[in-house]
Amino acid sequence: MGVLPQGITLSPDGARAYVANRGSDTVSVIDTVTDTVTATIPTGAGPDFVALSPDGTRGYVTVADAGLVSVLDTATNALVADIPVGAGPTMAAVTPDGTRVYVTQQAGTTVSVIDTATNTVTDTVPVGAGGTGVVITPDGTRAYVACFSGSVRVIDTATNTVTTTITAGDVPILLALTPDGARVYVTNAGSSTVSVVDTATNTVIDTIGVSAQPRFLAVTPDNAHVLVANSLPDTVSVIDTATHTAVENVGVGAGPSGLVIHPDGTHAYVVNSEAGTVSVLATTVLPDQGSTAGGATVTVTGHHLANATAVRFGTVQAGITANTDTSLTVTEPAGSGAVPVTVTTAGGTGTLGTFYYTPLPALTGISPDSGPVAGSDDEITLTGRNLAGAIDVYFGTSRAVIQSVSDTEITVRASTAPGPGGVPVTVRTAGGSVQGLTYTYVGSSTVTDISPNSGPTSGGTVVTITGTGLSYTEQVTFNGIPAPFEIVSDTTVSATSPPSGAAGTVPVTVTGPVDSPTGSFTYIGGPGI
């Protein structure tokens, strides 16, 4: 793979994948049968994405640093035209009839519309700052554009005008449509969430929490799940579209960004930008992890599954709740370890994947164990056992954003809380949920009085600091010099002044997890000769 691979797309038949390598100014072509790179195509500076025509004969490469869309002949793997589109072209989408390409410009405020017959820009649509993701509905009547400014703009493709502005989460970046066009899923990089947009009403009907820095996302062909690449913790979240909840986090390579699902629904390709690799993720069993107690809803994907008579997890039969020729919905039975998932039909029995029974997690520690009510960008470390694949972490009712995960450690960032006080910490994995630790949200502190407020330069004066919110005092300093202290109550701290090299009034600072209010103390020099 090239350097800093970004977006990935598949040919309509799923036989080839195209990966834009921003760092090496190339496009890699992958044969999906052998999972090998068969061609490397030089481009202009900074390619981000390749959009393919419905018949797969043309690719449209957004070349961000060059301000171009390059046209790729997929039969010869040659670039046959360059189309200037303005600053920072990022993503592109081709209309279902193949006649137009809509191109976002992250560095600008418009979407360019390309006529594919003439390879020229025939229109520009103002959408606001930071347009990034773009998708077009199956009937071709609307284009949805995610803009950094916090909105999704809806373009009427007949008039090339914005008809609706939808408020999404913080920094909406990329989009995915359901196969029937009824829903648009939007990754919000700033809030680590996915917004669900009803395209009939163009309103956000739900918001789903995922892990830090979500990027590309894709909907499975059966519309049962959405996969989301989370670039910071190196995971892919699996969202159940029926419940709009994340049901699994799957570890992949470093810095996952691009993601696409094969047309047959059996596997996904995940571009690991930092690692310079592409992971092949099996999607025949989703989720493929669950509690040893059983009970999870699992979708099994394959071919010729109609009228299946049995689905077994190892030797234990699962209950079938829905059945089509390409997918089965079953209820996971109780079990342990890693077991094969087999399906029996009139034609025989086949193994479609593996299911991993996950033990219940346990928590042993948290550091730091307190922080501001407003939340914080500082990382909080949870330690324990069986934490790999953590799906959610909650401090009380506030969802913390997962930054990294291993089997023994999770790092998170705390979100805003309703108010100060201690709250239980909850970790949810495929194996179940666990509590047992407390995190304390702390309000602002104040210093209202220091008594006595003077003493000798030799130090040793015991002073009483009065104020509010002092229970979580971490340090007391006199002019920056740490002083011994004792927390008496939420309104009182006792401290002993350290020696000072000179007389005069100095600040006394009480440092806590939220802020550092100050008072003053005057050092008095001794008599001289």
Image (spheres, rainbow, N blue to C red):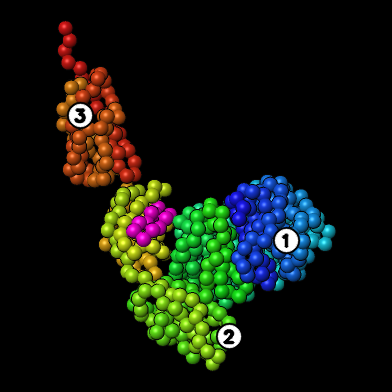
Q: Which residue is mark 1?
A: 59
Q: Residues within 10 Å of mark 3 (few under 14, many from 20)?
A: many
Is residue 25 found inside the magenta-colored segment of the image? no
> Considering the numbered disc 3 on the image, is that residue within a helix, a strand or a loop?
loop
Residue located 17% across and 43% down the image: 488
Residue 342 seen in render: yes
Viewport quadrant of the C terminus: top left
Q: Is residue 188 visible?
A: no
Indicate whether residue 411 is drawn in magenta: yes
- Give the Cα separation between the discs numbered 2 and 3: 80 Å
Label pair 1/2, CB-CB below 8 angstroms: no
> Mark 3 highlights which residue?
497
Q: Are marks 3 and 1 in contact (CB under 8 Å)?
A: no
Q: Position of residue 195 (x, y in %)?
A: 53, 63
Numbered disc in front, either 1 or 2? 2
Mark 2 neighbour density, 10 Å: few (under 14) some (14–19) many (20 or more)? some
Q: Which percent across, then down, holds residue 278?
A: 56, 60
Residue underneath mark 2: 304
- Where on the picture, by quarter, is residue 316? bottom left
